[in-house]
């Protein structure tokens, strides 16, 4: 069994990692780190894990994990690794943004870098919006088609903001409300351009939605391809990728929340492709993708231990 440690186990992404890894057939949890909740059992923070993961949280990592997940706030992962050089012996999967442009880390989007991830010791998990937008653009980007400027929008659930309280995650603000934010300045737009090697700009407007989980993005790309050919291009590209499926109709959140899979759909009108991607921001956009990356780095089936069925209703 592979021993894994989770740094930042009390946050949303960290807790979701615990939920996924608790049922992974090839993994056992070596330790769970949370400086703010050290001494408490994991199930005290996530009651749904009562009797499943009652492991006490600890303030510091030990050196007995084969794989270490960093589920800490953006800006904290790099400092944490510097403070704990003993972790260099482990495979590192960083869910923060700290190493996504670091040459020492492989960008952990399996649909782009599967073979590099298989040989990686340091993996930078993509951001949630970046995952959805990249999956929307990958087949076009690597089909030989020159991409012009791209326009995109996306809506995300409140878990995307993390566990710490802020005015925009309070129920009274979030409920029955949609709020655009970081207009044309969201860091995931530049992340996508860097990961896919895009020269033209990506104009992205994200929105906060009145729900807890899930992301739907819509990208607009000029194209001369007919809709049938574009759909074929996407089906062929993702045929080899088990966690992304081309949907014959526009996907909705009910089909992806609770699952590690992403759904992509295309339509073409007046020489403009509309590409829609739906995924669970806590799973394919965070924890499940991190476990998928671990699976690849360990030589396992990349879907091992991952939930493949959505909640449905």
Image (tube, grey):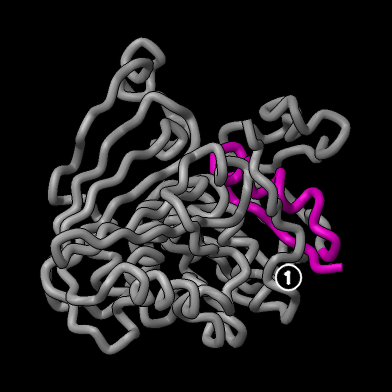
Image quarter (top left, top right, bottom left or bottom right) of the N terminus = bottom right
Residue at image x 16%, y 57%? 151
Residue 174: x, y in percent?
35, 20
| Residue 67 percent location from the top left of the image | 68, 67
Residue at horizontal 30 percent and vertical 45 percent from the top: 154
In the rendered image, is residue 75 in sight?
no
Between residue 99 and residue 260, name the one nearer to us. Answer: 260
Q: Which residues are magenta?
A: 1-26
Q: Secondary structure at mark 1?
A: loop
**Image height check: is 254 above or below 104?**
above
Residue 216 within the segment the image draws in magenta: no
Q: What residue would you read off at disc 1?
A: 66
Whole-percent x, y for residue 68 in the image: 64, 63
Towards the viewer: 116 or 67? 116
Q: Quadrant of residue 103?
A: bottom left
**Camera sees residue 272:** yes
Q: Does residue 33 appear to the left or right of 166 in the view shown?
A: right
- Taking the image as shown, residue 156 lies to the left or right of residue 123, namely left
Judge by depth and name the residue closer to the eye, 2 or 269: 269
Question: Which quadrant does the C terminus fall into?
Answer: top right
């Amino acid at each position: 069994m592979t021993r894994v440690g989770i740094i930042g186990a009390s946050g949303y992404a960290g807790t979701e990692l615990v939920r996924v890894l608790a049922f992974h057939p090839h993994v056992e949890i070596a330790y769970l780190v949370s400086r703010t909740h050290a001494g408490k059992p994991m199930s005290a923070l996530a009651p749904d894990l009562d009797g499943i993961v009652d492991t006490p949280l600890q303030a510091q990592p030990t050196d007995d994990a084969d794989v270490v997940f960093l589920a800490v706030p953006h800006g904290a992962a790099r400092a944490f690794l510097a403070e704990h050089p003993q972790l260099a012996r482990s495979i590192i999967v960083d869910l923060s943004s700290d190493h996504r442009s670091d040459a020492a880390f492989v960008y952990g989007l399996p649909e782009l870098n599967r073979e590099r991830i298989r040989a990686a010791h340091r993996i930078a998990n993509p951001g949630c919006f970046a995952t959805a937008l990249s999956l929307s653009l990958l087949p076009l980007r690597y089909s030989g088609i020159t991409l012009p400027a791209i326009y995109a929008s996306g809506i995300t659930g409140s878990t995307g903001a993390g566990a710490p309280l802020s005015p925009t995650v309070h129920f009274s603000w979030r409920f029955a409300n949609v709020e655009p934010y970081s207009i044309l300045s969201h860091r995931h737009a530049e992340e996508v351009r860097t990961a896919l090697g895009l020269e033209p700009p990506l104009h992205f407007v994200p929105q906060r939605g009145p729900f807890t989980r899930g992301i739907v993005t819509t990208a607009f790309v000029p194209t001369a391809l007919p809709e049938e050919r574009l759909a074929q291009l996407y089906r062929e590209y993702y045929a080899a990728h088990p966690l992304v499926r081309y949907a014959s109709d526009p996907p909705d959140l009910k089909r992806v929340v609770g699952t590690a899979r992403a759904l992509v759909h295309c339509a073409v009108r007046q020489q403009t492709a509309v590409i829609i991607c739906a995924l669970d921001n806590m799973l394919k956009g965070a924890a499940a993708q991190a476990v998928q990356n671990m699976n690849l780095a360990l030589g396992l089936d990349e879907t091992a231990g991952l939930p493949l069925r959505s909640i449905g209703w």
